Image (tube, rainbow, N blue to C red):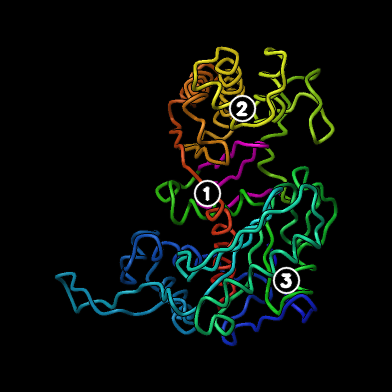
Amino acid sequence: MAVHGGGKGAVGLIRMASEPALVGAAGDDTRARIFAEILTAGPFSRTEVAKRLSLSQSTVTKAVNPLIEMGYLLEVGERSSGNGRPQRMLKVAEDRYVVVGVKLAPAHVTVVLTDLSASVLARHRQFMEAGYSPQAGVEAAVRGIEEVLDTEPDARERVLGVGVGLGGHVDADLGRCVHSGVLGWDDVDVAGLFSAALDLPVVVNNDVNALVVAERWFGAGRDSASFAVVTVGAGVGCGLMLGGDLYTGVSGLAGEFGHMPLESDGLLCSCGNRGCLETVASDLAILRDISQHAGVPCTSMEEAVRLARSGDDIALNAFAAMGRSLGRGLATLCNLLNLDKIILTGESIGSYDLFGEACQDSLRDHGFSSAADDCVVVVHDADHSLWARGAACLVIRESVYAAM
């Protein structure tokens, strides 16, 4: 993942924080591991960090010192272990810097301002017309960024950068959207557009990858080194944390779970192929199923959920069919990766009560040996701010990497 510098543009101008900067290649990821450990479970002494992460004392000291010097960590008193002299405790300096996170979704643009612990300080959401252009999306985001920065004293002097998350194939090293079916974008220099409008470093990644980092630091993935975040809604997304590291593949394509081929002669997918999981395990699959069997169009998930919860058999069967297909896909993930956790979330997770049982049954039916039993499925509601918060986590992560 690369960080892209900003230039002064016509849409807006934000000054960059003067001390730390997201520049050059990422540094030793040991710093990021230590920072995340202190952030999510601290405060800790250096000795405690070394034990928790199985690192040497000298390694921890070498990694921690620049984090203190750059203002990411603070020493906050002492704790006695009963043997030897008391040890200085370390905690994250939450208020030292602020970070911006942006979620570019098909119908809206969400912006949050967070502190260094990724706690949301302010948020802005703007609804967008379907099929909006990249330039329109960036302009909406910049307006939101200006608004949230106005809510905090000296925010423009303390802001580390902007994290941007969007659905689709994102080359994080180049900051480019290679292809996004949900946005209808191809080969878009997202980082370049933001950098032209903001005098700030920019980090761009797939939105589910950003969510994986947020779940690892603050959510259901805190106690797990190998898990997947699977999102259900208009599409089916996936992000992977393997062995404690975000796994994105050689070109950022890892986790395109929704485009896993299930049926060679199946329905045409938005990606141009046939039989993808997304064609049978998304909102569209439910709406199509209800419409076909009822003989009248079902045009919204609100209507589909209302029908199912009123006991309509056609709607209930459509949700169950979607759940069975999703469960088969989850079984494939478990069989391939032997995960210890799958976090289900997304805009349609609120209807899990309608498809969850079928999904779990299908996962168990198709899981090889103990793969399904080894994996805990956690259902996690995710509002739009959580996605943007995940994008902010990308900036914090890169800032800690780059601290020299």
- Label 3: few (<14), some or many (≥20) within 10 Å? many
The amino acid sitting under disc 3 is His
Q: Is residue 153 above or below residue 384?
A: below
Q: Work out how far the residue at label 3 is from the one at label 2, CA to CA, in angstroms.
A: 35 Å
> Considering only order in the chain, which callout, 1 or 3, is on the residue closer to the N terminus?
3
In the displayed orientation, state which residue is furthest to the left: 82
The amino acid sitting under disc 1 is Asp
> Considering only order in the chain, which callout, 2 or 1, is on the residue closer to the N terminus?
2
Q: Which residue is mark 1?
A: 383
Indicate the quadrant containing the N terminus: top left, top right, bottom left or bottom right. Answer: bottom right
Q: Work out how far the residue at label 1 is from the one at label 2, CA to CA, in angstroms.
A: 24 Å
Indicate the quadrant containing the C terminus: top left, top right, bottom left or bottom right. Answer: bottom right
- Label 1: few (<14), some or many (≥20) within 10 Å? few
Q: SS for tag 3?
A: loop
Q: Work out how far the residue at label 3 is from the one at label 1, CA to CA, in angstroms.
A: 28 Å
- Residue 149 place in picture, x, y as percent: 57, 75
The residue stretch that appears in magenta: 227-249
Report how many numbered discs are placed on residues in the image. Answer: 3
**Which is closer to the viewer, label 1 or label 2?**
1
- Label 2: few (<14), some or many (≥20) within 10 Å? many
Please give the name of the residue rendered at 76% of the width and 24% of the height, measured from the top-left corner.
275
Magenta-colored stretch includes residue 351 = no
Please give the name of the residue rendered at 40% of the width and 48% of the height, measured from the top-left corner.
223
Q: Which residue is mark 3?
A: 4
Question: Label for residue 329?
Answer: 2
In the visual, does 53 lie left or right of 255?
left
Q: SS for tag 1?
A: loop
